[in-house]
Image (cartoon, rainbow, N blue to C red):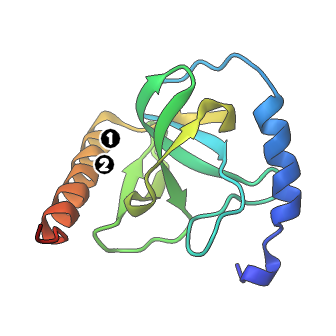
Amino acid sequence: MDNTEKDFDRWGLEKKYTHTYYRKIIFYEREIWWAKIGVNVGVEIDGKHELFLRPVVLLKKFNKHMVLIVPTTGKEIQDEYHIPVSGEDGKIYHVCISQIRTISTKRLFRRVGKTDKESFTLLISATLEMIRKNTVNNETPH
């Protein structure tokens, strides 16, 4: 999406509503949810459509208010930062581990499904390897 097409104003209104709206959400690691990712800056993955949604995989539940997620992309890209993940229903999701982030659970909109255990284990391993590799390779001298 070209920067001139990003609707930051409409996202601001939706984000304000999302922040103030309360509902009890029950969620678990390995699940796939539609989340209100929003309109973001630069190459950060944006949400789509009127609610700025994107499917995300829940990696780590910190508490009932905060979760570590990795967003999906519709593009099948074959590199170290894009991992195919199988849902328990057999559907393949392409996740972008370089866009890992923590979100408020207020952004979770609707549960889509759950990853299978093997895919989730591979996703966690690839994410940890990305962090380890990039941290070790990008160290600066003290």
Name the spot of residue 9 as percent of width and height, x first. 87, 62
Task: Name which quarter of the figure residue 90 lies in.
Answer: top left
Count of residue discs: 2
**Mark 1 to mark 2 CA distance (whole Å):** 5 Å
Pointer 2 residue: 123
Residue in the foreground of this view, choosing between 7 and 71:
7
Q: Can you tell which mark lies on residue 120?
A: 1
Element under disc 2 = helix
Residue in the foreground of this view, choosing between 116 and 62:
62
Vertical comparison of 28 with 141: above or below: above
Q: Quadrant of the C terminus?
A: bottom left
Q: Residues within 10 Å of mark 2 (few under 14, many from 20)?
A: many
Name the spot of residue 56 as percent of width and height, x first. 54, 47
**Label 2 near label 1: C-beta < 8 Å?**
yes
* Amino acid at circle 2: Leu
Residue appearing at x 84%, y 47% in the figure: 14
Q: Is residue 132 left or right of residue 78?
A: left
Task: Name which quarter of the figure residue 3 lies in.
Answer: bottom right
Element under disc 1 = helix
- Residue 87 visible in the shown view: yes
Name the spot of residue 103 as percent of width and height, x first. 56, 40
Q: Residues within 10 Å of mark 1 (few under 14, many from 20)?
A: many
Residue appearing at x 24%, y 56% in the figure: 131
Vertical comparison of 138 with 3: above or below: above
Name the spot of residue 27 as percent of width and height, x first. 54, 23
* Amino acid at circle 1: Phe
- Residue 29 visible in the shown view: no
Q: Is residue 138 left or right of residue 123?
A: left
